[in-house]
Amino acid sequence: MQLLTGTSGYAYPQWRGSFYPADLRDEEMLGYYAARLPTVEINNTFYRIPKPEVVETWKSRVPPGFTFVIKASQRISHRAKLRGDDAHGSLRYLYSVLEPLGDQLGAVLVQTPPFVRADAGVLAELLAVIPDGKRVAFELTHGSWHSEEIDRLLLARGHCRVVADKEDGTVSWPLLSDWAYVRLRRDDYSRPQLTAWLAELRARGLGRAYVFFKHEDTARGAEMALELAALAADETPPDAVAPRRA
């Protein structure tokens, strides 16, 4: 299994002096980050789709093989609620802007709000807009989306539902094919907990797994991403405390 660990965002001045050198310039952050972690989840695209020249700058600052995950615009998920020409047109435009990334676009993340309920027909129409060969991770927050019907609809097109850790420690696993997308949102994870996540992912026979930690005022998320990657490279990880299943 190829494990790609990273954080939700990277451009945090408060990380200077811990993850980043104290004197690192803003424009040097992405390159420094990409030399240490293999992927990043770009979240500010939720508020504004970037200009093509910004995307080209991102690519110029990372090594070959580094992958980006881009969060889809709120216009798609929150305003249009995945529906109709507004959502479809915005998604097409997003992919056109991201074209310079080529194979370094690992996935797009679509995160719906809790007030958007499941509608398989609406989802199927949106999936038809996604270019062939591109992968989308859907964080569908309302519980009505958490069904085998929705999972199979996503799997048929090569997409997946996000695995999201909950504050109470329970985890709801969707049906998966050859890849998974995990967002670990708690402030801290012990080494046994990280080892448990690694064991769970390995047991599912995946080809690739993305795992993203949230950012905080400190760089703890980046530290945990590095720690999980180190555990994955270790033949004899420590004992694990398995996450409870929902």
Image (cartoon, rainbow, N blue to C red):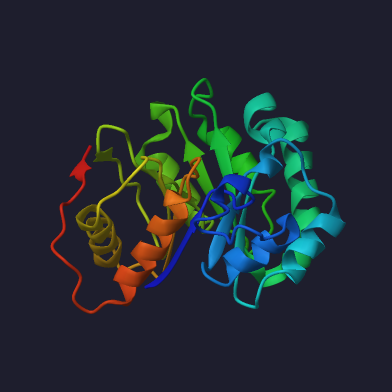
The residue shown at (66%, 71%) is 103
Q: In the visual, does 86 lie left or right of 151? A: right
Q: In the visual, does 46 lie left or right of 18? A: right
Q: Can residue 222 be spotted in the picture?
A: yes
- Using the image, determine if residue 213 lies above or below residue 78: below
Q: Can residue 180 be spotted in the picture?
A: no
Residue 47 % position (x, y):
71, 35
- Total count of labels: 0
The residue shown at (72%, 58%) is 25
Foreground residue among 29 and 245:
29
Residue 201 % position (x, y):
30, 61
Residue 15 % position (x, y):
55, 51
- Using the image, determine if residue 119 lies above or below residue 153: above
Residue 143 % position (x, y):
38, 28
Foreground residue among 155 and 21:
21
- Using the image, determine if residue 188 lies above or below residue 239: above
The residue shown at (57%, 47%) is 109
Q: Quadrant of the C terminus?
A: top left
Q: In the visual, does 83 lie left or right of 174? A: right
The residue shown at (40%, 41%) is 185
Extreme-top residue of the structure = 115
Q: Quadrant of the N terminus?
A: bottom left
Specify the quadrant of the image occupied by residue 149. top left
Specify the quadrant of the image occupied by residue 145. top left
